[in-house]
Amino acid sequence: MEKIKYEKPVISKITAGMPSKFGLPAKPKIISEIDGIPVSKLMEEYSSPVFVFSEKTIRNTISEARRAFETRYPKVQFAWSYKTNYLDAVCKIFQDEGAWAEVVSGFEFEKALALGVNGSQVLFNGPEKSANDLELAINHNACIHIDHFDELYLLMEIIRKLDKTARVAIRINMDTGIYPMWDRFGFNYENGEAWNAINRIMLAEKLELIGLHTHIGTYIMATSAYGIAASKLANLMMATHRKFNHWLKYIDMGGGFASKNTLKGAYMPGSETCPSFDEYAEAITNALISSEIPHENLPALFLETGRALIDDAGYLLTTVLANKRSSIGRRNLIIDAGVNLLFTSFWYNLGVYPSKPGSEYVEETTIYGPLCMNIDVIRDAINFPHVKTGDQLVIERIGAYNVTQWMQFITYRPNVVLIDLEGKTHIIRKKEDLETLKEKEN
């Protein structure tokens, strides 16, 4: 029997987060495998750092979301938010699960078409749509979500030139009790701007108003805000019908559902406080079903959630480079993955865990990446067990926004691996090298 290693007792002041009423966990969490594949094997084969995505988790998550909404509402359509993670392999999984494409640029639109998405199943959002982008959308019969009056007037010019009809919706911002209120995008509900836009579209030739869209914010924890938003969109839909005898085909509630990540400054972990898909679905569908809209004219419900569908499926595997002490004796840990790969480390207290059992002694630690920049901080303060140079760590819930907002800065971007439903691994994006960077230079 192996002798237990002696560790001297210590008294540590707790400042890296506060204990809940249940106290702090007695043992550090360990992530030793992903979908049955040992972390050590993944890192041996694909080097360090390496992004890993679980197809099983992606499919289970969207299945859970569909169940929550489809059991409460008769017509539901998800649209995958490309900006959240536009790796081809990821987009194809959502496409296979029946999701449409939600894009916010000509680049993302082109990517969706290249993946075989039918243009009529593309929702084109965003405040920046060039004349070429709008022509592309019209020619592919996409749903164009108009963001502002200048875009509306440009669209009117283009349809006259092309002599084609455009299918459009308008984005609407509103007061739902959330602070700060997102009023940068779309037409305002309260001051009548949205109603003005609807009237202009209904009076224009070759503009077919088919829907209303809103996106009230990001990482929204108050499900009641979605109920308020759905009620206001339902009111506009009924006003449109009363004035123009026109039924809209869909109401798009956008995204913004929270993932189980923990926001910086939060008292409790996101895994304990994040609303479920059922809670979001209850708020939205109750508002629509209870509105004045006759049941036989209920619009399709579109949802563009991204973060909540992909965050849990992503991991970043990384290696310890060094242990250090600051000038005041604080423990610093350096790993080989920095903020150039983990943009969301600026928002979240990301979960960082050892990949194998080790010391049960934890100490307040700052985890730094490898970049020669003082802002390269993965965790400002975390109670973390003692680890050695070469030990392997796992950072969880990094599926959203990191592989679209990462930067090629100081280090090459690493391999991205997908574990399929049969437990087989595939490189879905190859690690960069010098040739990757030089091929675009003259």
Image: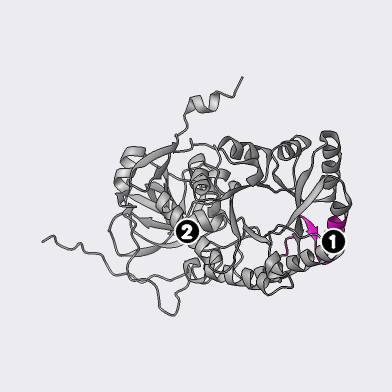
Q: Residues within 10 Å of mark 1 (few under 14, many from 20)?
A: some
Front residue of 341/290: it is 290
Q: Residue 145 got which mark? A: none
The answer to whether residue 275 is visible is no
Residue 360 picture location, percent across and down: 30, 64
Disc 2 marks a residue whose amino acid type is Ser
Q: Magenta region: which residues? A: 181-199
Disc 1 marks a residue whose amino acid type is Trp
Q: CA distance from mark 1 to mark 2?
A: 36 Å
Front residue of 142/27: it is 142
Q: Does dot 1 land on a helix, a strand or a loop?
A: helix
Residue shown at the point (52%, 61%) measured from the top left: 66
Residue shown at the point (49%, 26%) measured from the top left: 434
In-image side of 203 versus 223 (left or right)? right
Instruction: Choose top left, top right, bottom left or bottom right for residue 266.
Output: bottom right
Asked whether 105 falls inside the magenta stretch, the response is no
Asked whether 190 falls inside the magenta stretch, the response is yes
Residue 29 picture location, percent across and down: 35, 63
| First in residue order: circle 1 vs circle 2 | 2
In-image side of 144 versus 385 (left or right)? right
Give the residue pinned by disc 1: 195
Q: Does dot 2 land on a helix, a strand or a loop?
A: helix
Residue 305 picture location, percent across and down: 58, 57
Give the residue pinned by disc 2: 63
The answer to whether residue 210 is visible is yes
Residue 351 picture location, percent across and down: 44, 59
Residue shown at the point (47%, 32%) measured from the top left: 432
- Marks 1,2: beta carbons within 8 A: no
